[in-house]
Amino acid sequence: MSNDEEDTVELPKLQELMAAAAIARCLMPERLRGHEIKAMRKILRMTLAELADGMDSKTAVETVSRWESDAQPMGGYAEKVLRLLVCERLHEKAPGIAYDGAMISALKQIDPWRADPNYDLPAIEIELMLLKQNGHVEEAWAA
């Protein structure tokens, strides 16, 4: 390969991979950070206005923007609504991730960044594997 050529890597089922990662993150108890909220909105293919409307008719676009920029922390109730919205809209694209709405309602959120601003989230490990669903086998991303 010459120096002016680039190697490319293709990820199979990219939309499903992003959905699986978003759901896996939503099921972790650590509070969502602004860049994660923005990433989830983009995975959902929603504008700021669409996400604000999907959250609650009283949620302002400016509020969502402040959440995404970490200028304003998201309240616990709003965060659970966002997690539920993400999981409900994406769970069919990620059949390899075990999800039930009750998992979100039972989630006790923690904020490890208050005690340690350098806290790193545990890695989310997802692999492409065969999954039997509705009587047939298909590839799916699973945690």
Image (spheres, rainbow, N blue to C red):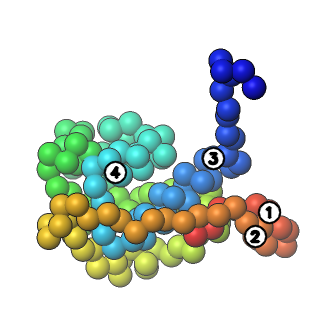
Where residue 98 appears, as percent x and y from the top left, is 57, 74
Q: Residues within 10 Å of mark 1 (few under 14, many from 20)?
A: few
Q: Residue at x 17, y 55 (%)?
A: 73
Cβ atoms at labels 2 and 1 below 8 Å apart: yes
Q: CA distance from mark 4 to mark 1?
A: 30 Å
Which residue of the protein is positioned furthest toward the right in this rendering?
Answer: 136
Q: Which residue is mark 3?
A: 14
Describe residue 124's horizontal placement relative to residue 3 as left or right. Answer: left
If you read the primary sequence from the N terminus, does the residue marked by circle 2 or circle 1 appear first?
Answer: 2
Q: Residue at x 19, y 43 (%)?
A: 66
**142 shown above or below 35:** below
What's the residue type where badge 1 is placed?
Answer: Glu
If you read the primary sequence from the N terminus, does the residue marked by circle 3 or circle 1 appear first?
Answer: 3
Where residue 42 appears, as percent x and y from the top left, is 44, 42
Q: Residue at x 84, y 73 (%)?
A: 135
Where residue 39 appears, as percent x and y from the top left, is 40, 46
Q: CA distance from mark 2 to mark 3?
A: 17 Å
Q: Which residue is mark 2?
A: 131
Where residue 132 appears, as percent x and y from the top left, is 79, 72
What's the residue type where badge 4 is placed?
Answer: Ile
Tally of numbered tags? 4
Numbered label attached to residue 37:
4
